[in-house]
Image (tube, coloured by chain):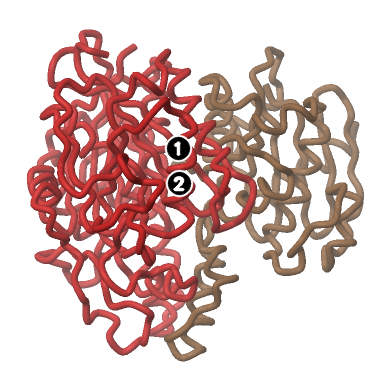
Amino acid sequence: MIRAIAWFCADHHGVFTPAGESWQRPSPALSTSASAVKLIGRPVNYFSRMTTEARFCLCAASMALKASRWPESRGAEIGVASGGCDGCLAADQEYFRDYVASGRTLGRGNLFIYTLPTSVIGEVAIVLSLTGPCLFIHDEVRPLPSLARHAQRIVADGEAAGMLALWSDPRAAVCMAVDAGAGEDKIFELLSKSEATPLQLASGFQLMVQRA
Amino acid sequence: MNVAIAQSDVVTAYGWGLDALWDGLLSNETAIRATDRFAERGFLSNQAAIIPDLEVQGGESRSMAMLRRLLLPLVAKIDPSTPLILATTVGEIEYVEAAILTDRPELAAEARPQVLLRRIKQMLGLRGPATVVSSACASSAIAISRAASVIRHGDARRVLVIACDSVSEFVYSGFSTLLSLCDGPARPFDAQRGGLTLGEGAAWALLAADESPREGVFSILGWGSTTDAVHMTAPDRDARGLSRAIAKACAMAGKTVDEISFIAAHGTATLYSDAMELVALRGATQGPKPIFSVKGGIGHTLASAGLVQILVAARAMSVGIVPPTVGLQVPDPSAVDWAHKTSVRIGRAPLALSISSGFGGVNTAVLLGGGDQS
């Protein structure tokens, strides 16, 4: 079931859980590691080098992990799956544009390492010490509910005790904490009808929390 | 539920088909050559494993050119409802190159992996579920595991897995920048190895529910994926992530590592990645087992690499021969009695392990069983 959903976008961030521990607040500007310490719980090396999307993802993943109430000992068995219509397209263009501008001889390694769809969740796994499976998985139809279902299936296969499913683009990140627990999964029903962008979804959850 | 590799095909720098790949590896001659494709760029290497007779039609990517020919036998023959899983690292990255080099930004979106997914569906007339899986150089190994999961859970009787990646300026420049490229053909597990060589390739496998395992049909028995969570590009030198992936795959299959006959290694020929694999394997087994890497022959085919080595492992099980590690001259001290310059006759081989790793510290292990022995 989905234990928790957390979101982060430039204007607001928050958490929604079926257990009712929901909140939302205005977002801090994530310009430095210090600005994110409260959300992530620790200073992060290279934070200022990360892309905006990576920073959003890191905060959303950290909040979802905390709200899931999974025991800390499970860290080694938690994986991360990500999806998003554009994958790493923005990072790909940034790397190659910079390489061309530099004379097409030498690129920048710190840009190149972000040119994979799994680059962002690789950073998330390092910062949050998550050592389960790490993959980008994108279904052609209804990619968001499919992402949650793939995450559930990975847990059901015994590959992980829990999965963070990250749905993001450069404007917002939404993270679901998914495990094999049984329960009436109303959030899943909600997601199954969704074709929303990460930002639309984040705003939807903000409204739900405000109304609650 | 047994998940069998019902049909498959592959193209690498050795040529079209598994026979060409197998014969190339057994010949111990590398398909890696000096290429003039990036001659003016001043990269650290000019070596690559390029498909020699690839016909690229106007406007299409090299990945699509590979798939157009490789998938031809499936056109109008495959059940249109068959689910499709595509493994790729960066999609058709040439479109990003073209967008920036020709100042036509609208082209960049064509590089998104789901665009390639749609093209493949259209070519094959598929109407079932379609998914992109990407996990760096473990992409196709993970795609195989996801496909096997779909079948085991009864969601489909058959799943088509396709993997492809090409040698592009984008990727070549990146690996050159990271000082990862060897100045000659890659020499996996060699004491003097100096880095990887990029290669291009594509492969497909039709996985099918198979209720009656039999001789000559190979099965996906178990799998496990992990992340090192240590470094974005460098592997965990203690190999904890890969060790756990191997243990997970064996546990899922109800087998022990010591029952495995041989190992299809990732074997990129980079200093730390090869060393990490050997740390994992030495820690997991009672003694040496034959390992091989295909990357000295066909280069590192990135997203395709995992599936390519699984198909080679299946052939090795079928003929009872572990192919040589092409390019190996003097084994690294930690690889002595593991990696071999010549092929190794093993006879009956009921179990083989294929391991893959990649950027982001990802690791995947897939356990293969041989027909009725599984």
Looking at the rendered structure, the secondary structure element under dot 1 is strand
Write the residue at 16% across / 68% down.
Answer: B57
* Residue named by callout 1: B364
Write the residue at 18% across / 42% down.
Answer: B323
Looking at the rendered structure, the secondary structure element under dot 2 is strand
| Closest to the observer, B4 or A194 | B4
Is there CB contact under 8 Å for labels 2 and 1? yes
User: Disc 2 versus disc 1: distance between alpha carbons?
Assistant: 6 Å
Crowd rating for badge 2 (residues with CA inside 10 Å; few <14, some 14–19, many 20+)? many
Q: In the image, is residue A173 above or below residue B100?
A: above
Q: Residue furthest top?
A: B212
- Count of number-bearing discs: 2
The answer to which quarter of the image holds residue A175 is: top right
Q: In the image, is residue B151 above or below residue B231?
A: above
Could you tell whether A177 is left or right of A16 in the image? left
Give how far across and how far down residue B347 sits, in percent.
14, 24
Write the residue at 50% across / 38% down.
Answer: B242
As drawn, the chain in red is B
Q: Which mark is residue B357?
A: 2
As drawn, the chain in brown is A
Residue B121 can be seen in this image: no
Residue B191 can be seen in this image: yes
**In the rendered structure, which amino acid carries the disc numbered 2?**
Ser
Crowd rating for badge 1 (residues with CA inside 10 Å; few <14, some 14–19, many 20+)? many
**In the rendered structure, which amino acid carries the disc numbered 1?**
Thr
The numbered mark 2 sits on a residue in which chain? B
Could you tell whether A137 is left or right of A145 in the image? left
Give how far across and how far down residue A79 sits, in percent.
62, 36
Pick the quarter of the image with the N terminus of chain B.
top left
The answer to which quarter of the image holds residue B169 is: bottom left
For marks 2 and 1, the one nearer the N-term is 2
| Closest to the observer, B168 or B306 | B306
